[in-house]
Amino acid sequence: MKNYFFSIILLSLCINTAFSQELKNINEPVFKAGEELSYKFKYTFFTGAEGHLRVEDGDKIDGHPTYHIIADGKTAGTFDFFYKVRNRYETYIDRTTLLPYLYTENRREGSWKHTDKVTFDHQTNKITANKGVYPYKGKVFDFVSAYYFARGIDISKLKIGDKFDLPYFLDDGLYSLNITYMGKETVSTGIGTFNCFKFNPTIIPGRIFKKNSKLYLWITDDGNRIPVKANVELIVGSVTMELTGTKGLKYPLNPISK
């Protein structure tokens, strides 16, 4: 639990709406450099962590202009005193295709530390990480770039109960996350009430999640397509993620009430 807890919760930011049957190139990103998203994570009734995502202009990689995306997560309040977490995930993605070129992570959770550097070679279809080289087919992402690619995909034809997969690389291998579309709901947060799409990603039971744990994620039904809330059941209690602030959005954030 201590080695992967915060990473799994932060991953809930990134399991948006990509579906494998139509992973087409995005005509135009729904975000821009300067965008910043802030979240809080509550364990039952207590704020236990904070998460931040920001987009910057990146350096060219092999002649290709990039976005540089940084995701930071840290424990807060009493949780920070008993079990300190400081995690950073960074990715460089092509400004046109939004496919990743370089992903790094630096995680410190209690006394446990982990770093990784992952490169994606889209000419040879090989991923090189600290633990080896991994061939792949089709479009594959790190979990941060997956979120930003997924935000721009057309989901207008989805029907309630439709299932799809999101392929991503993490730590030591390739994985596929199965997601079910649950329909539309109105969701209230501390910064407003929003019309949202609701999704249910599949959870693998283990030391964190119980056998029948459910993870729900709510995405704004607007041009930005950003997560405003997520909730996941744990063996003991639950964790809720909630949007607390935004900056530099490409499109207006339009709550139906504040």
Image: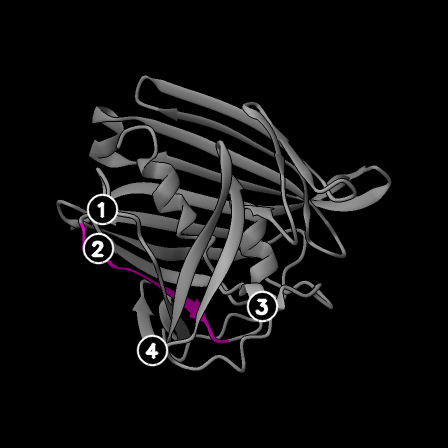
**Badge 1: how crowded within 10 Å, few (<14), some, or many (20+)?**
many
Residue 248 appears in the figure:
no
For the residues labelled 1 and 3, the Cα–Cα distance comes to 29 Å
**Badge 3: how crowded within 10 Å, few (<14), some, or many (20+)?**
few
Q: Nearer the viewer, mark 3 or mark 2?
A: 3
Q: Which mark is residue 186?
A: 4
Magenta-drawn segment:
211-221
Q: Which residue lies under the disc numbered 3?
A: 21
Residue 98, image x, y percentages:
69, 53
Residue 174 appears in the figure:
yes
Tell which circle, 4 or 3, labels the residue nearer the N-terminal end: 3
Q: Amino acid at mark 3?
A: Gln
Number of numbered labels in the structure image: 4
Q: Amino acid at mark 4?
A: Thr
Q: Which mark is residue 209?
A: 1
Marks 1 & 2, CB-CB < 8 Å contact? yes
Residue 124, image x, y percentages:
76, 40
For the C terminus, the image quarter is bottom left
- For image coordinates 25% across by 59% down, the residue present is 214
Above or below, 231 against 252 in this view is above
